[in-house]
Amino acid sequence: MPLAALRRLLGHQPRSTPNHRQTSSLSRPGLQPLEDRCVLSTVLTVDDDHAQNAHAQFTSIGAAVAAAQPGDTIRVYAGTYAESVMVNKSLTFVAVHHGGSVVVNPGTAGSGFDVEANNVRISGFTIEDATGAAGITLSRSFSGYDIENNVLKDNTFGIYLNSSGASKTVIRHNSFISNNAAGSASGNGIYSDQGVSNARIEGNHFTGQENAAMIFVGNGTTAQAQSNLRIRGNVLIDDAPIILVNTTDSVISGNVSLRSSGSGIFFGGGVSGVVVSHNVLRDGAFTGINLRTDSTNYPVLAPNTNNIIRNNVVSGFGDSGIRLREGASGNLVANNVVVHNGGNNDSTTGDGISLENADNNVIRGNVAEHNRRDGIRVDADSTGNRIEGNRLRFNGEFDARDDSTGSGTAGTANTWVRNKARTTSPMGLASHGHDEDHHDEGHDHDDDNDHEHEHGDD
């Protein structure tokens, strides 16, 4: 039959009844694109006890997957499904909440959903108690995943996020709650170690994870590349850090982290070309934004270089606000508000911004106030840095401190220009002038030379 005639015929088929008790076990077929072909798609229905849909075809999700064709939609009605669902076709899974939640509880059988196919969508499920596995596992060999509006709780970890990057993956509007069950990678909301790129992680809520809200620890090889990540608009409450290792060309912006059990944002090494902007990080246990080369815990290939950290608010952290450490170079730290850090009373921390064996970075236009130790502190091993136009005051020891020696400003190995500070060591790092009555913590002074290029794509 010609395609046009088929479309006309399908267009005159009666629609399925919108009520959850459907009049037919299959809804009207439709034409869906798949691999550049038009194919018929079907809606299959699953109800574990037929209480919500007496006409459902299946009582298990796995049985529906076995019967489905690529492009089909599987609607799952309220109930608890004690199964690990292997997904080896491009399918859409939709939880139908008439009568209660749709719970997938695999126990020790594996992940709630184990996905080995392109373009799989999972929406509206509660996935819990996957012991020794993730709630959802996504394969490095495929891409185009769409994971939205799910609750992942009490699994060993929430989502095992890997992707080839051929098509965009979206992890959006999910809740990650206390994914700390025993097993490898325990304590993480989102965990990735096989490589992921072209992914959007947006608008999710994290609470109760003990290791990391999200952690990306590919080894930096082409096989495990991590790039083009957009981590935006997530809320982390009483959770753990965002951790990146060996990651390039990505954005972390507009997130809120309150009372992290560790740092707010942690770079373990090998991170380059990442923009960290407009985040609010408050009251965490360790450091607000921490750039380390941590080869003890991660497969680090290089220090953290050429990143932009700007327009963030970092306050109330136990150690310091922002730390550039262990070879960090070529980074820009600009227009951040860094206040009231150092509550742990550790004699080696407590600064607003610190450079520790960090060279050739630019520290510009920041506000650092009321930190327990120094506003900006540069250690003896940090050289070639430019510290410019910062406002520093009311810090516990010095507003501006540089322990290096060389041919730079005031006999240091760095350049200090147009900074305002009350107390400095050595003298001459800053002037004493302040705009006492015009301090605006929400300042956002962009420089024409330092645009973030955050990419406005979806």
Image: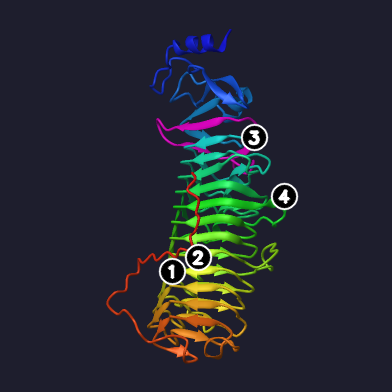
Q: CA distance from mark 4 to mark 2?
A: 28 Å
Would you say the residues marked 2 and 1 are in contact, meaning their CB atoms lie under 8 Å apart? yes
The foreground one among 212 and 292 is 292
Q: Amino acid at mark 3?
A: Ala
Instruction: Kindly state the secondary structure of the residue where label 4 is placed.
Output: helix
Q: Amino acid at mark 4?
A: Ala
Instruction: Kindly state the secondary structure of the residue where label 1 is placed.
Output: loop
Would you say the residues marked 4 and 2 are in contact, meaning their CB atoms lie under 8 Å apart? no
Q: CA distance from mark 2 to mark 1?
A: 8 Å
- Looking at the rendered structure, which numbered label has been put on residue 336? 1
Q: CA distance from mark 1 to mark 3?
A: 42 Å
The foreground one among 151 and 278 is 278
Instruction: Kindly state the secondary structure of the residue where label 3 is placed.
Output: loop
* Magenta stretch prevailing secondary structure: loop
Q: Quadrant of the N terminus?
A: top right
Instruction: Kindly state the secondary structure of the residue where label 2 is placed.
Output: strand
Q: Which residues are magenta?
A: 88-116
Q: Which comes sooner in the sequence, label 4 or label 2?
A: 4
Q: Which comes sooner in the sequence, label 1 or label 3?
A: 3
Residue 297 at least partly seen: yes
- Looking at the rendered structure, which numbered label has been put on residue 309? 2
Badge 4 is on which residue?
Answer: 223
Q: CA distance from mark 3 to mark 4?
A: 18 Å
